[in-house]
Amino acid sequence: MYLSTQSELEGFCELISSSKVLAVDTEFLRERTYYPKLCLVQVAAGDAIAAVDPIAIEDLSPLAELLADPTVTKVIHACSQDIEVLLDGMGCACAPVFDTQLAAAFLGMRQQVSYGSLVEAYCGVRLPKAESLTDWSRRPLDPEQLAYAEDDVRYLPGIYERMMGELVERDRLSWVLPEMAALCDVSRARREPREAYRRLKRASSLTRRQLAVAREACAWREETAARRDVPRKWVVSDEVVVEVCKRAPTSLDRLRRIRGTDQLGERDARELLEAVQRGLSCPADECPRASRHARPTAEAEGVVDLMYAVLRLVSERSGVATQLIATRDDLLDFLQDRESSPLAASWRWELAGRTLSRLLAGEVGLTVKGGRIEFL
């Protein structure tokens, strides 16, 4: 069903109102805007599938109520962007969510498996890719576009049922649900301008004082981009922001010496200089702490390499994706400060932390048998 009127939407929402599981997907554009433009919402409840047109329908509250209902599980593949788009486009905090991409990483598939690969693995269906670059804001939508869009939710209810059965059978549901709760936390989708510097590319190369400048500069850029509804890089690029933080110019002339600042109008340039000055004036004890690790010694690097070999062996045997269990930074954290590491608690300790602890204590070793790494 293609729903383009208020009455059609209300009728569909009434039809699926008793469903406890809804498959959801969105189509949106954001190449030329700060806020994503919601163009389509696909919903499936059992055999009932609809593509809801938020451009044609002004009041989406009947659907928003269902998506926000805490008694209804929303099944979404790779949910983070969809949660952000639904929050922006419908004012809807979509929860609780079951993310099939995350669940797949606990069930023997790679961590960021595509939706197409998941459908092929679970349903034996190979989905077409012809509409992957569609401009979803253009109207009318043709039958091929709508069929493509509806396919994005058509198979999710069945996949969800099978995944739930597998997770229960392997006694992993208690591992997955907290991870999903953290991943689907809508607070992650809300934009806090003074936290934007944490997403700045190459921020790890900055000192604490330079990070204080980055915090102010990125907050200014975020607020400016949001006010104009343009991509933040259209205001000023990450590369230019990093260079501004390193040089900390205090005059318009010195700012203009940085390549890439020529796109800034005079008002923007002066506002950026004011942001730099706020960062330079920040008390030392209030400067952000760098999140990067101190460069490990060669000996520590060797130990982390051995730990990673153990981690990959644990991943292979358990079917849980390696990067989901731990990254190399997590392993270094475990080596340097075991008690504060994520590997020291919950399912990660049970699955890998205990074995890594025994490795570091000299109680576990590795060998090669038949061309494969095995525990001694």
Image (cartoon, rainbow, N blue to C red):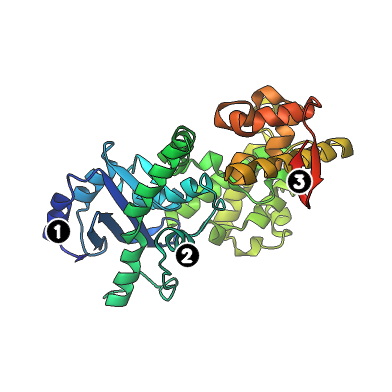
Residue named by callout 2? 31
Q: Closer to the camera: disc 3 or disc 2? A: 3
Label 1 with label 3: CB-CB less than 8 Å: no
Q: Closer to the camera: disc 1 or disc 3? A: 3
**Distance between the alpha carbons at the discs numbered 2 and 1:** 29 Å
Amino acid residing under circle 3: Ile
Looking at marks 3 and 2 on the same chain, the residue that comes earlier in the sequence is marked by 2
Q: Residue at x 54, y 47 (%)?
A: 220
Viewer-closest of 249 and 170: 170
Amino acid residing under circle 1: Gln
Residue named by callout 1? 6
Q: Position of residue 370 (x, y in %)?
A: 78, 51
Residue named by callout 3? 373
Q: Position of residue 7 (x, y in %)?
A: 11, 59
Q: Residue at x 73, y 54 (%)?
A: 254
Q: Position of residue 294 (x, y in %)?
A: 79, 36
Amino acid residing under circle 2: Glu
Q: Closer to the camera: disc 2 or disc 1? A: 1
Viewer-closest of 358 and 209: 358
**Distance between the alpha carbons at the discs numbered 1 and 3:** 61 Å
Q: Is residue 73 above or below residue 230?
A: above
Disc 1 element: helix
The C terminus, quarter of image? top right
